[in-house]
Amino acid sequence: MLTVFNIQRFSLHDGNGVRTSIFFKGCPLRCLWCNNPESIDPLPSVMFDERLCNRFGECIKAADGRIYEADGALVIDREKIGDPGQLMDVCPSKALRVAGREMSAAEIAAGVEKDLPFYDMSSGGVTLSGGEPFAQGEELGELLLLLRDKRIHVSAETSLHVPWEKVSKYTSLVDMFLADLKHTHPLKFAQYTGGDAGLVLENFRKLDASGSAFVIRVPVVPGFNHSEPEIFSIIDFAAGLEHLSEIHLIPYHSLATEKYHMLGKAYTYKGFADVSKQELVAYADYASQMGITTKILN
């Protein structure tokens, strides 16, 4: 089974045309600024939006003492909730919800197939996202084969922070890779993401050698990589890749702060202003000088 926390239809920001974005649970990185913190844990996550809570008490009944009221507030003992799935859809006001459920490849493909007319009209398709789609099990291959049988264009958003074997088996089934390149310096990459920059850079070289089409996506994050030496280093590396289609620069924003609160976690990447598109123009100009088509995304 595949673990999915969201299926977003009619998306216009995750590839060409009208797309359906499938967000998978589980990520090998721990980026301090992560915009989808509910995607990190491979298991279902309990989220609670106190603003929507009407104190109906259905969650308390369903949680066997692991959710209770204290001092006028709802307390959720997430570590003791063995099966978050038991809380799925119990809250009438949707204040408490479970991010992540198991779905079969056939179930996902059947839902996606409903939007075929929109894909055909707009040259759209499906985007695998997350989390990290290539951290899923073998059933990911089944899904990709079903989509290929329906002639649906597939893009895959990936950190490339997985063993190459997890990617190489699917290069013939993915039409476009949207791959993150966050930093080229191993120490800083490890400090802010918990990962191995060398693995990512080597996988980019292997992806390029495979002949696959790919876009490099660069989240521009203050305090991490938002400087000319750091972004220019990424662009210099990209310029040496033969099959690179484009570079997309993605400005940092702090819109996910509330999600951390809903997960019962602290958002530790505080104190940084959102990055404006104008701040990225110099980076885009440098990439253009290197002969690389560049877009600044929202």
Image: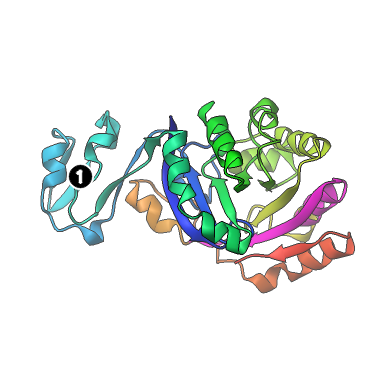
| Residue visible at 45% across and 36% down in the picture | 106
Residue 74 highlighted magenta (yes or no): no
Q: Quadrant of residue 235?
A: bottom right
Q: Nearer the viewer, residue 161 or 275?
A: 161
Question: Is residue 17 something that shows in the picture?
Answer: no
Three-letter amino acid code at the position of disc 1:
Val
Is residue 44 shown above or below 111? above
Residue under numbered circle 1: 75
Left or right? Give the position of 100 relative to 105: left
Q: Total number of numbered labels?
A: 1
Residue 233 highlighted magenta (yes or no): yes
Is residue 96 shown above or below 293? above
Q: Quadrant of the N terminus?
A: top left
Residue 170, position as x, y percentages in the image: 66, 33
Residue 209, position as x, y percentages in the image: 83, 36
Left or right? Give the position of 294 relative to 130: right
Mark 1 element type: strand
Residue 206, position as x, y percentages in the image: 79, 34
Is residue 283 shown above or below 233? below
Q: Which residues are the magenta region?
A: 231-254
Residue 227, position as x, y percentages in the image: 73, 59
Q: Nearer the viewer, residue 77 or 169?
A: 169
| Residue visible at 80% across and 50% down in the picture | 244
Residue at the outermost bottom position: 278
Left or right? Give the position of 255 relative to 220: left
Q: Nearer the viewer, residue 255 or 15?
A: 15
Question: Is residue 130 something that shows in the picture?
Answer: yes
Q: Nearer the viewer, residue 60 or 242?
A: 242
Graded by Cα atoms within 10 Å as few (under 14), some (14 to 19) or many (20 or more), the crowding at tag 1 reads some
| Residue visible at 14% across and 33% down in the picture | 64
Left or right? Give the position of 98 relative to 165: left
